[in-house]
Structures are given as C-alpha cells and as structure tokens.
Image: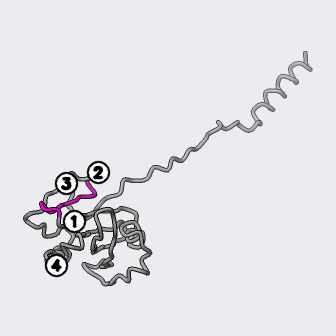
Amino acid sequence: MKKVLCAALLLALLTGCAAPQAAEVFYVQDEIPAPARIPFSIQFGVPADAMAQEPEAGGLQRQYDAADGSYTIRTAILPGEDADEVMLELTGLQPETLSPIRTTRHGMQAYRFSWCSADEDGTRLCSAAILEDEDCCYCLSFTMPEDSAKQNRTLQMQVLDSFSLFEDEGF
C-alpha cells in the first residue's frame, strides 16, 4: 500500500511539471489590395459639336466625337501606370521616339507629344497630353483625319491647352 501511495503521489507531482501544450494556430495573410482612390477628375473645354459616347472602363475612359467625324477626343484615367507605359499603349511607339515635351504642371509631371497613325480610313494626326502623379496618369488625346487637319488644328490646340484636373472631394 505504501508503494501504491508513493507511486500515486509521484505521478501527481510529475504530471504538474509537464509543460502545457499550446494549441496549434495557423496564420493566413490575404493580399487584398485597397481600392485605388482616384483623386482627380479630368477637365477640358469640350467643343460644342462634340458628342459624348458612353463611358468605358468603369467610367475612367470617355470619348467625344465630332458630329461630322472630323475629330475624336479621348480621356483616360489610368491607375497604377506611368507616363511611359501610357505613351506606349496610346501610340504603339516607344516614348523615346515620340520626343515628348516634359514639364511640370500643377506640381505634377506633364507630357505633351504628337504622332501619326494609319488605319483603313487613312492617316490620322494625333496629339496627347498626360499629367502624372504618384497614383495614376491622366490622359487627354485629340485625333483627326489628315484631310481635316487644316480646319481642326486650332481646335486641337484649344482642347489640349484647356486640359486640367479637378480635385474630387468624395461627394
């Protein structure tokens, strides 16, 4: 009996000395990007005869066409892209071949450039302006068929010169 009592007492003492087993925990990290906040809206002087098309890409791209088809104006807000990527996407040409005019406007990098493109309808003369901040690029382009260049050259300059940004206040 004495041996059983000692064994029971010894067993009770030893079980209290064992380290407690921690519950097994798994940590999972989901990479969920925060939705990009578009801090600005594009503003420009829209010609009176321009017809607005339905917005594209969730409202971040718009197109305006002349009633007579003599020009097309496009705006695009491109989150996460830099100006070189936008130039390449817009023109199909490397930015170095475009020789863009680089300045600073409204505290942002500004770019202005022109190029020609050809399609089944003929040659188009194109010009664009880009404003770039740390979050995205804001682009305005004006394209016209070569045969309407004389009548639309002044309008093209007016539209591109009026390009600016409006700070959205979340209303």
Residue position marked by numbered label 4 in the rendering:
150
Report the amino acid beneath label 1: Ile
Report the amino acid beneath label 3: Gln
Question: Is label 3 or label 4 in front?
Answer: 4
x and y percent of residue 163 in the render? 20, 73
Q: Are marks 3 and 1 in contact (CB under 8 Å)?
A: no
Question: Is label 2 or label 3 in front?
Answer: 3
Label 3 to label 1: alpha-carbon separation: 10 Å
Disc 2, SS? helix
- For label 4, count other residues whose C-alpha is less than 10 Å away and answer few (under 14), some (14-19) or many (20+): few
Disc 1, SS? strand
Question: Is label 4 or label 1 in front?
Answer: 4
- Chain-order first, disc 3 or disc 4: 3
Report the amino acid beneath label 2: Gly
Report the amino acid beneath label 4: Lys
Residue 155: which quarter of the image?
A: bottom left
Label 1 to label 2: alpha-carbon separation: 18 Å
Does 12 sit above or below residue 97? Answer: above
Label 3 to label 4: alpha-carbon separation: 25 Å
**Camera-side residue of 4 and 111:** 111
Disc 4, SS? helix
The region drawn magenta spans 59-69
- Chain-order first, disc 2 or disc 3: 3
Q: Does the magenta stretch include residue 60?
A: yes
- Tag on residue 53? 3
Left or right of residue 50, residue 95 in this image: right
- Tag on residue 73? 1
- Tag on residue 58? 2
Residue 156: which quarter of the image?
A: bottom left
**Camera-side residue of 123 and 9:** 123
